Image (tube, rainbow, N blue to C red):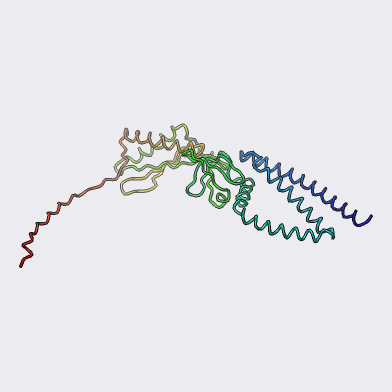
Amino acid sequence: MNEYWKHIIFAAIVLVVAYIAGKILKFFISRYFERSSKTLNVAATNYQFLKNAVNLMVFIAALIVIFYTIPGLKTIGATLLTSAGIFAAILGFASQQAFANIISGVFIVIFKPFRVGDVIQIGKDVEGIVEDITLRHSIITNFQNRRIVIPNSVISSETIINSHIEDEKTLNFLEVGISYDSDLDKAIEILRDEAIKHPSSIDNRTSAEKKKKEPVVRVRVIAFGDSSMNLRAYVWSEDTLEGFAMKCDLRRTIKLRFDREGIEIPFPHRTIVYKDKKQPLTDISDDSFID
């Protein structure tokens, strides 16, 4: 068998191996993305091009092996690679930000910091419910029903607070100030009673705490203010959204109960002092300037 046929057989074997390797990689990547997409509640088709990209990279690697192994093609391969390298550098510079978003999107799929439907806070300014996750960006619906489209590369560089990872239950701080003349024990009892009665309030005590008969809702005096004693009730809810609505309800019922029970919620008082008006200056006639 002459060298010509040996090179053809070698190239055919490399291409067949690349085809099989591409299919195997595509299968495993496909399974991984399908599982991840179910977890994130995202359509797996959003990541379809990645599977095709892996297949393409395998075939490019196979062609490089063929061109560098066969002597007659080595020079042509080197020229093509040089040209391709220049083109790739230009293309890479032009699409740097887009590529960063895609890589960040893949990391979101792999590490799953949040899913569609999660309540999250990104940085200090963005808070809402995750509506969609794509390779380029994620869409957050805030609590004013506005869609916030954030590039994935921006999300990856920010601190993410996720209220739904692992355990959705939320501890809500309900704070209120009472006057120093009010009955402290009665105010604590009212806070605890109103919190326990609310339908969104849950008992999150451990078995040990229940045996010790710890209260379902803890209330503590957290500070002595200028005009009030500041109390904080620790109330558990099933999730963040229920907790927010519960706190709004409790502020109303606690205020009404305080009014009935004679517990005062103080407010700032200002003393305004009116000074005497200044007497107007006496008119000076022009004659006063005459010697």
Q: Which residue is drawn at 65% across and 57% down?
A: 90
Question: In which quadrant of the rendered view does residue 92 lie?
Answer: bottom right
Q: In this view, does 98 lie to the left or right of 270?
A: right
Expressed as whole percent of the image width and height from the top left, the position of residue 224 reads 35, 48
When the figure is inspected, residue 231 is found, relative to residue 198, above or below; the finding is below
Q: Residue at x 61, y 52 (%)?
A: 100
Question: In which quadrant of the rendered view does residue 27 lie?
Answer: top right
The quadrant the C terminus occupies is bottom left
The residue sitting at the right extreme is: 1
Q: In this view, does 111 lie to the left or right of 177?
A: right
Expressed as whole percent of the image width and height from the top left, the position of residue 125 reads 47, 48
Expressed as whole percent of the image width and height from the top left, the position of residue 56 reads 74, 49
Q: Residue at x 32, y 45 (%)?
A: 228
Question: In which quadrant of the rendered view does residue 230 lie?
Answer: top left
What is the count of numbered marks? 0
The quadrant the N terminus occupies is bottom right
Q: Residue 110 or 42: which is nearer the viewer? A: 42
Q: Residue 107 or 14: which is nearer the viewer? A: 14
Q: Residue 157 or 232: which is nearer the viewer? A: 157
The residue sitting at the bottom extreme is: 291
Expressed as whole percent of the image width and height from the top left, the position of residue 126 reads 49, 46
